[in-house]
Amino acid sequence: MVKFSERANSIQPTGVRRMFDMAGDDTIQFGLGEPDFQPPEIAIKAFTQAMEEGKNKYTTTAGLPELRKKIAEEWSNLSPNLTESNVCITMSGTNALLDVFLAIVDPGDNVLIPEPYFPLYPPDVVICGGEPNLYPCNFDNGFVPKIADLEKLVNDKTVAILYNFPSNPTGATLSIDERDKLVDFAIRHDLWIISDEVYDRIIYNGSHVSFLGAGHDKLFLINSFSKTFAMTGWRIGYILSPDDDAMIQINKMQYYVTACSNDAMQYAVLSALENAPDYPNTMRDEFQLRRDLICSRLNAMDGVTCHIPEGAFYVFPKVEVNGYNSKELALKILQLGGVLCSPGTAFGEAGEGHLRFAYTIDRDGISEGMDRLEEVLIKLRG
Ligand SMILES: Cc1ncc(COP(=O)(O)O)c(C=O)c1O
């Protein structure tokens, strides 16, 4: 008899992917969270040049020292003592998350995970033998958690709390005051903070509020160049921790998971950081125009309400049509209107009543998609 592990049997493909696989050629795609831009030209050239120069080998596990140094410098305004040894280059944010859970979760431990969530978090914790301990980030509270809810859920097997701001799927950001209350909660319960800040460069008003330098060094900051430089297919990111012992453990995990990141690509990312520092802002400005467009269209539709997201490139409106749950509704919108969005429940049960739209298509596409959506909703309401 063929046997697979309980771990493998217990996790399922994500709902976002399932919808994506059903889309036809003329579908308007609000499904996948990847920028519709190309990486900076200078990074592509640096990538090619590095390969031609023979940078095609294993690197040290933690990655290219110059790149790690550059990343440490970029965060030094928040944590001045950081050095390259506080950074480990990974093959994406996805790889970084797994390394962190592997380093701190034992069987029976639990990790506080926001719901709605980026769909990798709960399975990652399960893969490491732990249990996801879901805390609500509700629409009514601007998708920011309440300390009272966290206090009810934390217990003596809780080892960490994961935050994700700006958030996928909600686009929510944090104020400094809200961040400080969350840090205080983690300190009182002696928890690791895992802060997923992969959208830190896509902030529309004000600046990014990080968990780094906020008074709790028992911290893993997860980041990625996927969204920052539109390099989703390159698979490169990093883990940063001010805690030196934590980095020793992370480097071990990284070694056994994937040995090291891609050699030539690390030179390309270094080049992007050095020579195209404004590239993320240019992309962000375009996302802001799209955000304004999609939110005004959504909020003008009957039975649709959305917060105006302050970061990332997602909007997570409440869309209610009698007789349809979010999965059925997303399917109807795809079948009748040729518009692909993700059901809110692809991000956990708390996403019921919501749909997620990634505004990673041009403004004409957004307008056409919203026209089609509006027609479908009118039709479904009879
Ligand atoms: C919140 C969040 N974290 C991490 C990731 C992983 O990004 P990557 O693996 O491309 O670096 C994503 C990707 O969509 C994300 O939305």
Image (cartoon, rainbow, N blue to C red):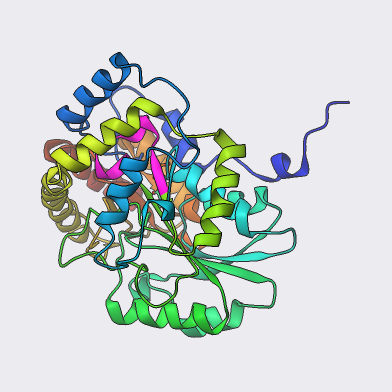
Q: Is residue 132 visible?
A: yes
Residue 366 lies in quadrant:
top left
Q: Where is residue 76 in the image (x, y as percent from the top left)?
A: 27, 62
Please state if 283 lies on the left or on the right of 316 as rendered: left
Q: How many marks?
A: 0
Give the residue displayed 25% in from the left and 61% down from the top. Answer: 309
Quick check: 218 above or below 88? below
- 147 part of magenta stretch: no
Q: Using the rendered image of the protein, determine whether residue 377 is visible from the camera's viewpoint.
A: no
Q: Where is residue 330 in the image (x, y as percent from the top left)?
A: 41, 45
What percent of the width, then of the height, locates residue 136?
49, 71
Magenta residues, start to end: 225-238
Q: Nearer the viewer, residue 128 or 62?
A: 62
**186 versus 304 height, above or below:** below
> Which quadrant: the N terminus?
top right
- Would you place residue 320 above or below residue 232 in this image? below
Q: Along the line of sight, which residue is nearer the eye, 376 or 350?
A: 350
Residue 25 horizontal/vertical position (percent): 31, 22
Q: Residue furthest right?
A: 1
Query: Left or right: 324 with respect to 47?
Result: right
Asked if residue 229 is among those painted magenta in the image, a careful observer would answer: yes
Q: Residue at x 26, y 38 (%)?
A: 270
Which of these two is toward me, 376 or 96? 96
Left or right of 288, for residue 327: right
Tell me: 147 left or right of 370. Answer: right
Residue 40 sits in which quadrant?
top left
Vertical placement of 167 versus 250: above or below? below
The foreground one among 150 and 194 is 194
Residue at x-position 42% and y-position 55%: 86
